[in-house]
Each structure stands twice: as structure tokens, then as C-alpha cells.
Image: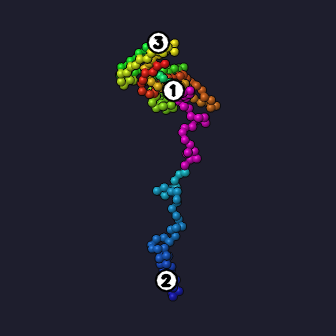
Amino acid sequence: MKTVLTRARTAVALTAFLVIGAGGTGTAFAEDFPTQVNSDQDGNPIPAAPADAGVDGPVHTDGCPPDPAISITKVKSTFVGDKSKTVYGQSGVTLSVSVAKGHTWTGTITYAAKLSESIIVASAEETISGSISYAKTTTVTLGGTWKVPASQKDGWLALGSKGYSFNWERGSYNGGCKWIVSNHGTARLPALAPFIAHS
């Protein structure tokens, strides 16, 4: 009987020691099961990102570069004149042109097959300059004169705007990653404010 009481007292003392050694109530072996570092709020592991998660932009189904809507080449700064407000003359002749506020004119676009001009203009805005447009409108009434110098056989005076000329292509890549052109042409589009020029 004495032996049984001794064992009971020893068990109580050991339990008390574990509680005090752990700094209070709780499980003495909690550190044997640490919370996962890479875990979400619900305790479940966060799924790993796929290996190609860092790839930027779309990838063509055939592994070729993505198909651009329009490819633009041979860009040059140029004067884009209004044909209805352009006058010509020989050496020594004084040329004159005037336009009223609200007058509008457009650039020019050529193509092998009919295509919406807005697609080409939007591509030019993104690729060349955000100030490019298909049409320009004068915000004030303006005019000017110019005499063709004796050193020139002839000359011109015109309303227009500084802009850009360029070649464009529309196409796609085939299974062998070869660029196949479906449409192409040229364009001359105004960009800056309207003004009068001569040559």
C-alpha cells in the first residue's frame, strides 16, 4: 500500500514540474509541431507558382512571336498638307491661302485591300506618337502669302500639319513562324497643330 502511494505522489510531482517548466498551463511539447512558414491563414500550404509564371506577354500557339495587328516601318517626319488648301505658282508669283476656323482635312492611307483606317491610326499612335490622328481641324482662322523666289522654277503654299509618313503591313505567323502579309500600304498622317507651309 505504501508503494502505491509513493508512485501516485511521484506522478503528481512530475505533472506539476512539466506545467511550471512550460511557463504556465498548456502543452509542454507544443514546439514539436511548429506552424508552417509557407502557409495561408487557414493553415494550408500556399500553392507554388507555375514555372512559367514570370513570362511576360502572350505567346503564339506555334511558339512564334505574338501576331501584331499592324507592323510599321520606314517612318519619316513630313508635312501633311490639305489638298483643297494647296496652291501652286511659277517663279515670281505670289501665292495666297486662307482657311476659316473649323476647317477639317484628313491624312492619306493606301492599302492593297480595304481596311478600317482606325486600325492603322491606332497602331501609329502607339508605335510612333500619341499626337497622330487621321483628321485635323483648325481652331482659328488663319492665312498667309508667299512669293515664289526667282531661284525656283515653281513652288507651293499650303495649309497642313507636321506629321509622319510610313509603310504598314498586316499579317500573321504561320506554323513555320514565317510572317505572311495579308494587307499592306502607306500612310501620311498629321500630328501637330495646323499651320501654313511652303516650298
Q: Position of residue 106 (x, y in %)?
A: 44, 21
Vertical arrangement, residue 158 with respect to residue 126, above or below: above
Q: Which residues are magenta?
A: 49-76
Instruction: Mark 1 and mark 2 in contact? Answer it, CB < 8 Å.
Output: no
Q: Amino acid at mark 3?
A: Gly
Q: Residue furthest front?
A: 150
Mark sitting earlier along the chain (1/3)? 1
Q: Which residue is mark 1?
A: 77
Mark closer to the observer (1, 3): 3
Give how far apart the Cα atoms at labels 1 and 2 are. 100 Å
Vertical arrangement, residue 166 with respect to residue 8, above or below: above
Q: Which residue is mark 2?
A: 9
Q: Amino acid at mark 2?
A: Arg
Mark 3, Cα crowd under 10 Å, few <14 / some 14-19 / many 20+, is some
Q: Residue at x 48, y 31 (%)?
A: 129
**Would you say the magenta stretch is mainly helix, strand or loop?**
loop
Q: Secondary structure at mark 3?
A: loop
Residue placed most toward the observer, 39 or 128: 128
Mark 2, Cα crowd under 10 Å, few <14 / some 14-19 / many 20+, is few
Residue 101: in magenta span: no
Give how far apart the Cα atoms at labels 1 and 3 are. 29 Å
Residue 51: in magenta span: yes
Q: Amino acid at mark 1?
A: Ser
Q: Residue at x 48, y 21 (%)?
A: 108
Q: Which residue is mark 3?
A: 92
